[in-house]
């Protein structure tokens, strides 16, 4: 699986989750592999930015379902090329190309990769999107199945945004990238399942 944007997978949190839901696999919290790409965060202490929920949720869910299957977590740093829109005036997109360049240079690639991140398609320059999509095709040629989340906001944008075009004065549904790439499998529906899961996750940790 992948982490971006400073998200982290904290082993102690994963252990707490597995103690409750997969007590037979608590040891998996110490056994998954963490790899930093381009300065991606693999530290085990949450900062003050509020990041960590996405990385924690993804790691716990995957291990809860798939342990003892080995898990590798790549954390990739950096910012990609970016075109602002009304929902995202500053870059919050993921450095997918940095990640794919690293992974494709490895002699072995895990055969199933989960990636829960997506961007407003109109914020991704075409040349960059094309390069990333071709890299996904190269992974597919090596037998890799790439799974991506379809987003948290349905057709209104990643977070159920304004539906405003950033190239013309009109409203439109905002497709997500990389969901439009034909070499991946996009999974999910709209905001309520993911937002509900994140809310339950937050309540779980607040309650101790």
Image: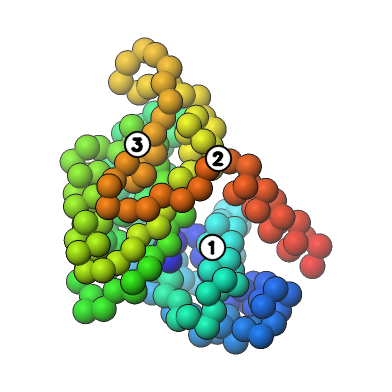
Q: Nearer the viewer, mark 2 or mark 1?
A: 2
Q: Nearer the viewer, residue 47 or 10?
A: 10
Q: Kindly identify which residue carries mark 2.
A: 190
65 relative to 82, above or below: below
Q: Nearer the viewer, mark 2 or mark 3?
A: 2
Who's the residue at 51% across and 65% down the image? 8
Q: Quadrant of residue 146?
A: bottom left
User: Which percent across, then down, holds residue 40?
Assistant: 39, 65
Tell me the SS state at disc 2: loop
Q: Residues within 10 Å of mark 1 (few under 14, many from 20)?
A: many
Image quadrant occupied by the N terminus: bottom left
142 left or right of 90? left
Q: Kindly identify which residue carries mark 3.
A: 121
Q: CA distance from mark 2 to mark 1?
A: 17 Å
Q: Kindly identify which residue carries mark 1.
A: 58
User: Which percent across, then down, holds residue 101?
Assistant: 22, 63
Q: Earlier in the sequence, mark 2 or mark 1?
A: 1
Who's the residue at 43% across and 17% down the image? 171
Q: CA distance from mark 2 to mark 3?
A: 16 Å
Q: Earlier in the sequence, mark 2 or mark 3?
A: 3
Who's the residue at 48% across and 38% down the image? 158
7 relative to 85, above or below: below
Answer yes or no: is residue 45 visible. Answer: no
197 left or right of 122? right
Q: Nearer the viewer, residue 203 or 192?
A: 192
Tell me the SS state at disc 3: helix
Q: CA distance from mark 1 to mark 3?
A: 23 Å
């Amino acid at each position: 699986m992948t982490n971006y944007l400073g998200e982290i997978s904290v082993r102690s949190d994963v252990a707490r989750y597995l103690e409750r839901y997969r007590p037979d696999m608590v040891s998996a919290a110490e056994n998954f592999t963490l790899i930093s790409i381009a300065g991606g965060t693999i530290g085990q202490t949450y900062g003050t930015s509020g990041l960590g929920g996405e990385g924690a949720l993804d790691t716990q869910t995957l291990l809860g379902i798939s342990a003892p299957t080995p898990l590798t977590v790549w954390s990739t740093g950096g910012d990609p090329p970016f075109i602002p829109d009304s929902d995202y005036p500053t870059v919050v997109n993921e450095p997918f190309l940095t990640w794919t360049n690293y992974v494709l240079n490895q002699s072995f690639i895990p055969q199933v990769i989960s990636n829960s991140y997506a961007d407003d398609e109109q914020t991704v320059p075409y040349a960059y999107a094309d390069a990333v999509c071709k890299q996904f095709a190269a992974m597919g040629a090596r037998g890799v199945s790439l799974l991506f989340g379809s987003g948290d906001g349905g057709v209104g944008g990643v977070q159920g945004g304004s539906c405003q075009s950033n190239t013309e004065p009109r409203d439109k549904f905002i497709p997500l990238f990389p969901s439009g790439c034909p070499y991946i499998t996009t999974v999910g529906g709209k905001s309520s399942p993911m937002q509900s899961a994140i809310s339950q996750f937050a309540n779980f940790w607040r309650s101790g």
